[in-house]
C-alpha cells in the first residue's frame, strides 16, 4: 500500500523508566499527504508545524466533522490565514511542494488516543496501543458502537481516499493498517473510539513496531 505504507514506527531508548521517547515517520509526496501526530505534540498551531518545513508545506488542513469538510490554513508568505490549534493525536492533511518526510517525535503520550466520532465522516488515527489491528475491516468491526460500515485511507498517488466497505456479509476493498495510520471512518451515530473501558496502558506496547 505505497506510503503508509511508509508510515514507520520505532521507539528510541528510554531516557528514564517513566519516559519513552520515539518517533513515527510518514513519507510525503508532492501534493496532499494525510498524517497524524501520535507522539507528544511540540507545536501549538498549524502554522508552527508548517514553519518547521521551511516553506515547502504551505497548506495544512483538518477534517471538521461538523461541516463534513476539510478546513485549511494557508501560508501567504507573510502570514498564515485560518490558522488553527493542533495537539497530540491530531490528524492532518499537509500539502507539500517537494518529496519529504514528516516525523512525529517526542515522548510517548501518557494516555491512549481516543476519538469522539459523529454521525458521518470522521478522521481518526490507529492508536499506538492497537497493534492487534491488521486490516481496515477489523477496525470497522471494532467500531460496532457507531455502526461504522466504511473505513478509508488517503492514497497519495491517486490523491484521493480509497474506501473499504461493509456489505453485511463481507468487506470489499479491504486494506492493511498499522499503528499511527490516519484513516477516515463513516459512522451512523456518535460514539467514542476506542471505548474508554477497552483502553490499556501504552507502556504495555512500548516495544510495538509497524
Image (cartoon, helix red, strand yellow):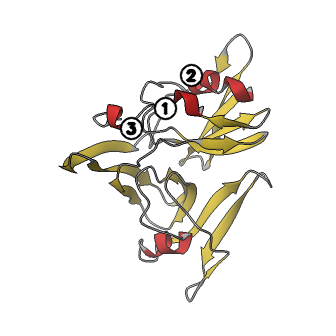
Do callouts 2 and 1 mark residues in contact (Cβ within 8 Å)? Answer: yes
Lower sequence index among marks 2 and 1: 2
Q: Secondary structure at mark 2?
A: helix
Q: Is residue 19 left or right of residue 32?
A: left
Quarter in which the C terminus is drawn? top left
Q: Is residue 166 left or right of residue 33?
A: right
Instruction: Identify the mark nearer the N-term, 3 or 1.
Output: 1
The crowding category of the residue bearing disc 1, from other C-alpha atoms within 10 Å (few below 14, some 14 to 19, many at least 20), is many
Residue 191 drawn at (x, y percent): 71, 36
Q: Which residue is mark 3?
A: 202
Classify mark 3: helix, strand or loop: helix
In whole angstroms, how far apart are the C-alphas of marks 2 and 3?
20 Å
Tell which tag, 2 or 1, sits nearer the viewer. Answer: 2
Asked if residue 148 shows in the view, the reply is no
Locate residue 195, reporting x and y percent.
Answer: 60, 31
Q: Residue at x 47, y 35 (%)?
A: 1
The earlier-in-sequence mark between 2 and 3 is: 2
Whether 154 is drawn above or below 85: the answer is above
**Secondary structure category for the residue under label 1:** loop
In-front residue for pair 209/174: 209
In the picture, the disc for residue 138 is 2
Q: Residues within 10 Å of mark 2 (few under 14, many from 20)?
A: some
Q: Residue at x 75, y 42 (%)?
A: 118
Q: Where is 146 relative to 111, above or below?
A: above
Q: Name the front one of labels 3 and 1.
A: 3
Residue 153: x and y in percent read 58, 40
| 94 displayed left or right of 81 | left
Amino acid at each position: 500500500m505505497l506510503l503508509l505504507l511508509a508510515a514507520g514506527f520505532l521507539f528510541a531508548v528510554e531516557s528514564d523508566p517513566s519516559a519513552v521517547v520515539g518517533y513515527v515517520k510518514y513519507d510525503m509526496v508532492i501534493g496532499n499527504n494525510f498524517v497524524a501526530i501520535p507522539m507528544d505534540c511540540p507545536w501549538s498551531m498549524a502554522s508552527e508545524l508548517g514553519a518547521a518545513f521551511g516553506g515547502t508545506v504551505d497548506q495544512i488542513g483538518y477534517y471538521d466533522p461538523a461541516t463534513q469538510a476539510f478546513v485549511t490554513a494557508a501560508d501567504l508568505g507573510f502570514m498564515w490565514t485560518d490558522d488553527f490549534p493542533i495537539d497530540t493525536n491530531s490528524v492532518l492533511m499537509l500539502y507539500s511542494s517537494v518529496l519529504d518526510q514528516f516525523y512525529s517525535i517526542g515522548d510517548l503520550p501518557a494516555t491512549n488516543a481516543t476519538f469522539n466520532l459523529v454521525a458521518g465522516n470522521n478522521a481518526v488515527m490507529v492508536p499506538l496501543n492497537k497493534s492487534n489491528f491488521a486490516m481496515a475491516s477489523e477496525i470497522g468491526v471494532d467500531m460496532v458502537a457507531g455502526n461504522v460500515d466504511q473505513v478509508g485511507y488517503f492514497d497519495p498517488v491517486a490523491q484521493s481516499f480509497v474506501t473499504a466497505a461493509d456489505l453485511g456479509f463481507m468487506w470489499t476493498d479491504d486494506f492493511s493498517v498499522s499503528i499511527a495510520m490516519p484513516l477516515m471512518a463513516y459512522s451512523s451515530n456518535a460514539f467514542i473510539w476506542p471505548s474508554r473501558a477497552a483502553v490499556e496502558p501504552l507502556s504495555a506496547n512500548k516495544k510495538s513496531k509497524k
